[in-house]
Structure formats: C-alpha cells, structure tokens
Image (spheres, rainbow, N blue to C red):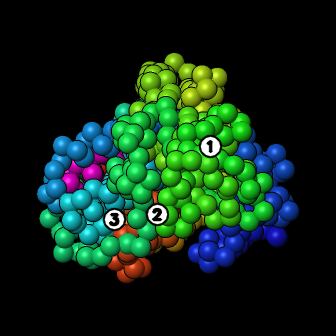
Amino acid sequence: MDPIVATLMILAFAIVAFVSNRVPLGIVAIGVSLSLYFTGVLTLPQALSGFGDPTVLFIAALFVVSESLDATGVTAWAGQQVIARAGTRRTVLLVVISLLVAGVTALISVNGAVAALLPLVVVVASRARIATSQLLLPLAFAAHAGSLLLLTGTPVNIIVSEIAAENGGRAFGFFEFALVGIPLLLGVVIILVLFGKKLLPERNGALMPTDLVRHARILRQQYALTIETSAILGPANGITEVLVPPRSPLIGQKLSPGMATPSGDLVLLAARRGEDQLKSGEFSVAMGDVLLLRGTWDDLTKQTASSDVLVVDAPAQLRRAIPLGRGAKRAIVILALMVLLLATGIVPPAVAALLAASALVLSRTVSVPQAYHSISWTTVVLIAGMIPLSTAFIETGTADLVARWLLTLIGDAGPQVALFALVVLTVVLGQMISNTATVLIVAPIAVSLASALDLSVQPFMMALTVAGAASFLTPIATPANLMVFEPGGYRFGDYWKLGLPLALLFIAVAVLYVPLIWHF
C-alpha cells in the first residue's frame, strides 16, 4: 500500500474512533502507532519513538508537580485567599474566578486547575446564591485562556515549541506565550462579564462538592462535639466517618468514645447507631454503626483503606481542601525552582520537570504511589501514540501533499488566508477530539505550508496553539469541559452559546494578532 494512502487511512480511522467515543483514547493512540508499523509506513523504533520522547516525559513529570500543589492544599489556600476578598457580586466573582483559574492553569494545566478549584467555586456560588451554571462554564473557559500564559499551561504549548525548534524555527520562551495569552484572557473575561449572564442557563447541578466549613459544623452538631473546628479539620490532623459493614471483624468488639483503635493510630471521638448517638460508656459494635475517628491525615488514609470499614468521606479528598497542609512550603519552593530552571533555560524542560518531580518524592511531599497515580496515563499514552503519526506525515510526504491541496484551494490569497484555513481546521477538529491529538495532526501540515510559502514557522505554531485552546463548543472537547457538566447542571447545547463568541475571538487573534508579534 502507498505510504501516503496508508497514513491518511490511519488518520481517518483514528478520527472516527476518537469521535465515536467507544474506544478508549489510549487504545486509539496505541492502535495508530502499531498500524503505522504493520503497514510499513514507519519502522518499529519510529512507531514507538513517542514513548521515549522528552516532551512526553516533561508532561508526565508536570502531573506530579500539579499533584503536589493540589494535595498539600496550595491551590485551596490560593483560591480561598482570592475569592474571600471578592464578595458575592456576580461580576466581581466572575473576574476573580477567571483570573485565579488562569493563573493556576498556567502552572499546573487546564484539567488540574479546574479539578482543584471546582469544589471551591461551587461553594462560593452557593454562598453568593448564584446558580452554579453561571460560574462553572466560565471557570473551564477561562482555564483554556490561562493555558496560554506560560509554557507549562498545556501539553500543546510544549509540543508546538518542540516542533518549531525542529523545523527551522526556535523554541518558544517560558513566558513568551503570555504575549498572546494575556490579550486572550482579557477578551474572555470581557465576554464572560458582558454576555455570560444572558448566554448561560440558570441551573444548579446535582453534584455538590463538600463545603468543609459546613461539613465540620454538621459533624459537631450530630456528634455533640466540643472540639473547635480548627482541631477537627486542620493541616496535620483530621476526622472521618466510617461505616461498619457486614462481616467486619469490628462487629462485637467493645469500644467507648475516647479510646484508641487497636492500631493505636486513631482515636474514636464518637459513634452513632441509626439516629441515636452512642454516648459515653462502653458499647458493642454492630453492623451499620457509624464511627467518628480522629488522627493524622496519613493515618486516617492508611487505616481506613481496609475492607473492615466503609469510608463516608475519603480522608485523602477532604485533606486536599485544607489550605496549606503538610508539605505545602516544600511544594511551593520546588515549584519556584522548576519555574526558574524553565525560565532561564539552564537545563532542557524535561530535565527541569523530572528534577522537580524527583525532589517532591525524595522530600516526601508526594509519596511514590501518589506520584504514579497522579499521572494521567491516558494523556501520556495519547501523546506518545500520536507523535509517530506526525512523524509519518512528514516522512511519507503526506503533510506536503495536504499543504499543496490547501495552497491550490486558497490560490494567491496570501499567508493569512492559509493561516486562517489551518486555524479553522484545528478549531473544528478540536471540538470532537483531543486538542493535543488535533495539534499533532495539523502541525506537520502547518510546517509544510510554511515551507512551501517560504515563511517562518513561528506564527503558524503559535496560531495552532491558540486554535488548540479554543475548545469551547462541546462538553467532550476537553476533560475540563466535561468536569463542570454535572456540577453545573449543563446540557450539550449550553456550551456553543457562550463558546461560539469565544471561539471567534480565538480565531481572530490567531489569524490577525499572532502574525503581528511573530512575523511571517
């Protein structure tokens, strides 16, 4: 089979698989790599080269850094500090939430920032008596704009920077993305403030994350606790409820409030049986009893992980909402050092991120299992599997062929029309499949187009970054869009109403503004 035909067929099958959403993304990516090998388009080392690519290692290490900020309560603290000063006015809250999530996204990625701040925004909406649908979609959309503030904002930034450097251009600087990111963020905030209320529905979602202040208050009331709230849920210690399941070895044991558990790590503060509280005095544990345990967060997480009890609220999740918990200072220092290495370029980006991830594990800010669990392996495998497709586009001449088709289509209309065609293609594909996969598919075409027109590759790569971030029209465009779907009570059609003006803004900036900064 002709290599170009094989490459295009593999691309077509990949797009169909992505859009169908019936095949896991990682399987599709691996299938792409293996198909390129079995059809003879690439050799085996070429087909599997993505799994050893420095870009993939850089992105994987950033997930560990993101986990450290989230797990130690740095993001919770930052969110509380900023939003506590915003009051309850919708406009002020929109601006503050947008700027906050953009800043966090620039450091820990879109999905990490939205996941970290979503519970906080839901609680703020509840306290301000604003429908969650009015704040959560702006949270996700502002995060997309924030991804263009720094190199670390999204894997797409890293990918296009590497591609530019490998194809006659240069790598983008750590802060260089802000030249386009800041105007886009300001534009997004203006659109959200002026049109958000009219274009967004008034609904509250079914899923409401835990409000820690309310949670602590309820526990104190239900169990008649005299302990202060700060002692109930603090940076070092916490409490959790566990339910005694059938066949638990605890059934029949004699316990009393104030005594330590058999391990000696936890203390039983109180217990309930149905609607009745088991007050002071010894009682025999029965199936269905609810026990309130207190101890360090590490001990709570470890001791409640067995099948002897069923956890009501997982300690590991409650702990994330505690501002500046154990290890927060170490996480901040290591993050600052990583940013310094990235900004100065003393070492390659992958080395800086791997050093940071290693330091976080060695300093016990993040445990080894925690580090492995924090990595989004779907994202890693997706990028690693799709990188060979980009290689195939270049090696087989497919990218040159598609570029010639585009040149024939646009004629002598000029470089901006060519850029417009690429940007629109990227935006359309990005609503159906991962923006990372989209950029990996379109980038080789952009390189060939720039070469055919004898233009710099820089504006094409930056425009692709902007277009890749314009994932506003569907809930399946990015995981961040999907995260807010249920908590915001959204429907599929809610996204494009607000997303369309934002997508048009991104297209305009990519086509008209980017070439003014990065010249053809």
Q: CA distance from mark 1 to mark 3?
A: 32 Å
Give whichever of 325, 35 is nearer the camera. 325
Task: Report, in whole angstroms, how far the alpha carbon at label 2 lies from the one at label 3.
Answer: 10 Å
Residue 62 on image: x %, y % = 55, 38
Residue linked to disc 1? 301
SS for callout 2: helix
Tell me the magenta residue range.
93-103
The N terminus sits in image quarter:
bottom right
Q: Residue at x 67, y 55 (%)?
A: 284
Dot 2 or dot 3: first in sequence order is 3
Left or right of residue 511: residue 352? right
Task: Read off the residue under disc 2.
Answer: 483
Horizontal placement of 115 versus 191: left or right?
A: right
Depth-wise, is mark 1 or mark 2 nearer the camera? Answer: 1
Q: Secondary structure under badge 1?
A: helix
> Which residue is identified by label 3?
137
**Callout 1: 10 Å neighbours few (<14), some, many (20+)?**
some
